Amino acid sequence: MSLMERDIMGGLAKGLSVIETFTAERPRQSISEVSVASGLDRATARRCLLTLAHLGYADYDGKFFTLTPRVLRLGTACLATMPLPQLVQPLLDRLSEQLGESSSVSILDCTDIVYVARAAQKKVMSIGLMPGSRLPAYCTSMGRVLLAALPEAAAGEILSQAPLPARTSHTLTDPEALVAEFARVRLQGHAIVDQEVELGLRSIAIPLYNSRGQTVAAMNVGVAASRTEAEDMTRLYLPAMIDVQAELRKLMR
């Protein structure tokens, strides 16, 4: 066992794994549900949840637990120390104003994308998106851009770590087809997702590079399917997005 492994606090690790089980799809959970989602035994999950409730990070109604806004302190502290949101937000605001559509920047975190900046013009999703929001990488335009930037084996490993549910009738879920899609995205330099995350939503995304040419994030523009056809998205939005991409590359080290 390495020195670092000997210093790891198992209780803290378990508590964080419990927090991570709460998602937009599972905002309210019982002890048994958290136990299953976290892989912890029921007694350990119970102790973690009661500790979170005692410290003000969760509410408990006698059966179900929900996280409280206090948890946001953890994510806010991270975002406040990251230079990326501060760099991209002014340019994202300008892009969104120019196109009249909502735009976002995200990074990859295991099987999910995490929003780090957003400029909203029109609500195009049923759920509210903001910095810190998470969505599955496999079916989102930004996720596919970020997965395409990885070696094929690494992208395939990420796909194997989580279920790939069909969120709509359009969602691509076959792992081999997704890997082929990543290759196409890598070749063309952008990804378009047509109503795979949610019916009525289309989006186009491109990678954001640092000055060394490494992909550090992805940026997208999301539109209502009723306003824009998928085949028109590269013509309508891609040139302005590429301008922002080039501008940010000069700023990101």
Image (tube, helix red, strand yellow):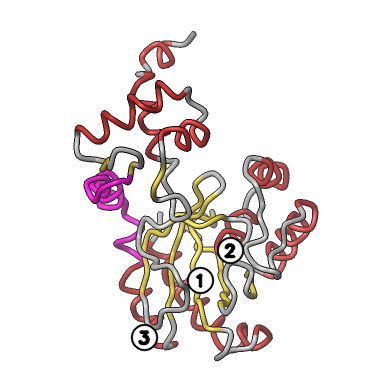
Looking at the image, which residue is at 27% across and 40% down? 60
Looking at the rendered structure, the kind of residue marked 2 is Thr
Res 233 quadrant in image: bottom right
Name the residue that disc number 1 marks. Answer: 220
Q: Residues within 10 Å of mark 2 (few under 14, many from 20)?
A: many
Task: Kindly report the distance in space between the C-alpha atoms of the residues bearing marks 3 and 1.
Answer: 14 Å
At mark 2, the secondary structure is loop
Q: What amino acid is at disc 1?
A: Asn
Foreground label between 2 and 3? 2
Looking at the picture, tell me which residue is in the foreground, 247 or 192: 192
Q: Position of residue 123 (x, y in %)?
A: 41, 79
The residue that label 2 is drawn on is: 140
Where does label 3 land, which residue? 97
Q: Earlier in the sequence, mark 2 or mark 3?
A: 3
Image quadrant where residue 165 sits: bottom right
Give the main secondary structure, helix, strand or loop, of the magenta stretch.
helix
Q: Secondary structure at mark 3?
A: helix
